[in-house]
């Protein structure tokens, strides 16, 4: 790589996940090693993983990436991991792809797949290269150390969805399907689940949400979501994942794990409880 390569850096290191390489490696590898997942014979199209601080969501993300890592042993490493995040604070239309040549976390540098980025942009005018929404946004970035560890040969595409309009979802998933016919990819949709003070409300709502996700029920999930009742804190990536999985022949997802912050931090019950889930999507 020449000296003029554009390197993007993880801005959340030290906040969302450890900034020290040894500590981060222990956190990620520990989550992967602790996860117990079923053997899945079919190639995996991708999965859903949470994006909160690693002390809360890292063990659940470990299930998704353990399944992807184990699956790659049988079916080969994907050439590209496409991470679908969204803007927590910045509102915009369409899909913003991160530019650059490399992405750096404390674990090292991973190539950004420029060819795949261009192929996705060709799928429609709502998909553009724009780094601005990515600045300080953790939803996609928090998945990268897990990709670097579980899928070390994979290049990266980072996509933030600014809306969940049907045309945005259609263009993106059509682009992903076309890319998947050219090369082996996995798609990781970044989302947390319900945020609410009441522990029992979060458990009950998340159970319904995960049932809809496993059933690929994108219309039902979209109807359940509203700005005041965000059953997914990241509904757009999930809707895109479900449509892509359906297009690629998936009939049903595999639920691997579901927990919430109230399970591991009971003191949060009655104040602020956040749900997390891990799901993967096999081909038919």
Image (cartoon, helix red, strand yellow):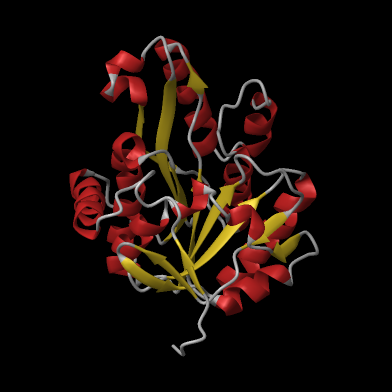
> Is residue 283 rendered to the left or right of residue 246?
left
Please tell me which residue lies in front, 105 or 192: 105
Q: Is residue 140 above or below residue 81?
A: above
For residue 233, which quarter of the picture?
top right
Q: Residue furthest bottom?
A: 2
Is any atom of residue 40 visible in this view?
Answer: no
- Residue in view at x 74 percent, y 59 percent: 171
Residue 198 lies in quadrant: top left
| In the rendered image, the vertical position of residue 68 relative to residue 166, given as above or below | below
Question: Quadrant of residue 277 in the image?
Answer: top left
Measuring from the top left, give residue 276's x and y in whole percent.
41, 33
Q: Position of residue 68 (x, y in %)?
A: 35, 57
User: In the shown orientation, is residue 264 left or right of residue 87?
Assistant: left
Q: Please name the residue shown 27% across and 52% down the image.
A: 39
Image coordinates for residue 225, horizontal then vertical, percent: 65, 27
Residue at screen point 33% across, 34% down: 56
How far across and how far down the image is residue 99, in percent? 60, 70
The answer to whether residue 7 shows anywhere in this view is yes
Quarter of the figure with the N terminus? bottom left
Which residue occupies 37% across, 26% down? 260
52 w.r.t. 115: above or below: above
């Amino acid at each position: 790589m020449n000296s003029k390569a554009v390197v993007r850096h993880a801005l959340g290191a030290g906040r969302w996940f450890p900034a020290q390489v040894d500590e981060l490696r222990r956190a990620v590898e520990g989550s992967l090693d602790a996860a117990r997942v079923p053997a899945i014979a079919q190639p995996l199209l991708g999965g859903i993983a949470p994006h909160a601080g690693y002390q809360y969501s890292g063990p659940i993300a470990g299930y998704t990436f353990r399944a992807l890592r184990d699956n790659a042993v049988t079916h080969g490493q994907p050439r590209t991991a496409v991470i679908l995040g969204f803007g927590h604070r910045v509102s915009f239309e369409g899909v913003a792809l991160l530019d650059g040549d490399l992405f750096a976390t404390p674990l090292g540098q991973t190539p950004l797949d420029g060819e795949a980025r261009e192929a996705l942009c060709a799928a429609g005018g709502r998909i553009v290269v724009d780094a601005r929404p990515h600045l300080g946004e953790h939803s996609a970035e928090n998945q990268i150390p897990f990709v670097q560890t579980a899928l070390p040969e994979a290049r990266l595409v980072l996509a933030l969805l600014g809306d969940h309009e049907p045309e945005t979802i259609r263009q993106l998933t059509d682009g992903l399907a076309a890319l998947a016919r050219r090369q082996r990819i996995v798609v990781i949709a970044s989302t947390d689940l319900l945020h609410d003070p009441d522990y029992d409300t979060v458990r009950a709502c998340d159970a319904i949400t995960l049932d809809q996700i496993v059933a690929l029920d994108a219309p039902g999930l979209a109807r359940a979501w509203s700005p005041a009742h965000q059953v997914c804190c990241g509904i757009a990536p999930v809707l895109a994942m479900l449509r892509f999985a359906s297009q690629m022949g998936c009939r049903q997802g595999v639920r691997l794990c579901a927990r919430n912050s109230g399970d591991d931090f009971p003191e949060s019950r009655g104040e602020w409880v956040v749900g997390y889930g891990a799901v993967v999507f096999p081909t038919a």
